[in-house]
Amino acid sequence: MLIRALVVLLIVLNLGVAAWWTLRAPPPAPAAIEQPLGVARLQLASEARSPTKPAPLPAAAATAPAAVPAAPTPVAVPPKEVAAEKVAVAMPAQCYSFGPFTDAAAAKNAHEVLMAVATRVLPRETRSGTTRGWRVVLPAAASLADAQATAQRIAAAGFGDYFIVREGSEANSIALGRYRSEESATRRAQSLVAAGFPARAEPLGEGRASYWLDLVPGPSFDTARAQAAVQIAPRPLDCARLK
């Protein structure tokens, strides 16, 4: 009897517990936890979201070309006409030749007068008549002793074929050789000048010297005034021959 009573009691208890569990009220929702300011909320790995992608641009904005920076202002280049004008001023197309002058002194005086209205004045010497060759000579020294000292320096510089003129109008000058052609005489004179000796090439014979002045005109040049100043008419000359 006792065992049967315990079994019935357990059945009644189980039925009571089951009825209470079924009919009980749902538990209240947990209160939200307030996070302190400035502290990020912890998230589970499953709650993490992928970063949002930027919204696509509108079709018009996607196809619009990027803004191109403004091009720098080009540097002004002088026109060709200005450059040509400057060249023309530096070397005009028309030059002039004055001559012939009777002697070197007259040509020198005219040179000083023409320089006031010219950019350049170039002396030129020509010979008329027959010649028998060319010679190279040093101008006469002040004394025979000076001529001998110059001759010693010429020999020390490695030059031969020279002698001192002791008599006549060219006394104390130094002759440095005779040549058949002007080219050979000029080459000899130039080598001596390069060594520091004032040698010059001269023609031999009855050829008469004439002196000319080739002129590059300046801004104030006037042919009529220049002719009146030197008493010789200018002749046209191509400036390309003076370059």
Image: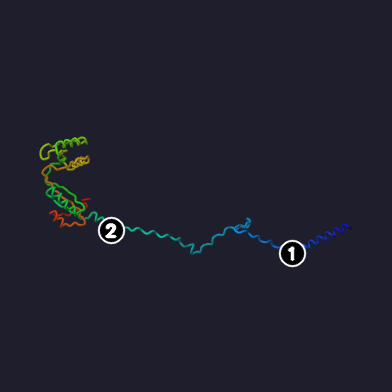
Kindly indicate whether the residue at mark 2 contacts the one at mark 1 (C-beta within 8 angstroms). no
Q: Residues within 10 Å of mark 1 (few under 14, many from 20)?
A: few
| Residue name at image x 74 percent, y 64 percent | 25
Q: Depth check: give the residue in front, 70 or 62.
A: 70
The colour scheme used to paint the residues is: rainbow
**Residue at mark 1:** 25
Amino acid under disc 1: Ala
Describe the element under mark 2 as helix, strand or loop: helix
| Residue name at image x 13 percent, y 48 percent | 105
Residue furthest front in the image: 37
Find residue 14 and report its image quarter: bottom right
- For residue 205, the mark is none
Vertical order, 33 against 176 (above or below)? below
Task: Answer left or right for 88 relative to 9.
Answer: left
- For residue 82, the mark is 2
Q: How many marks?
A: 2
Q: Where is residue 68 drawn, in percent x and y?
A: 43, 60
Q: Depth check: give the residue in front, 106 or 36.
A: 36
Amino acid under disc 2: Val
Q: Residues within 10 Å of mark 2 (few under 14, many from 20)?
A: few
Q: Where is residue 166 drawn, in percent x and y?
A: 12, 36
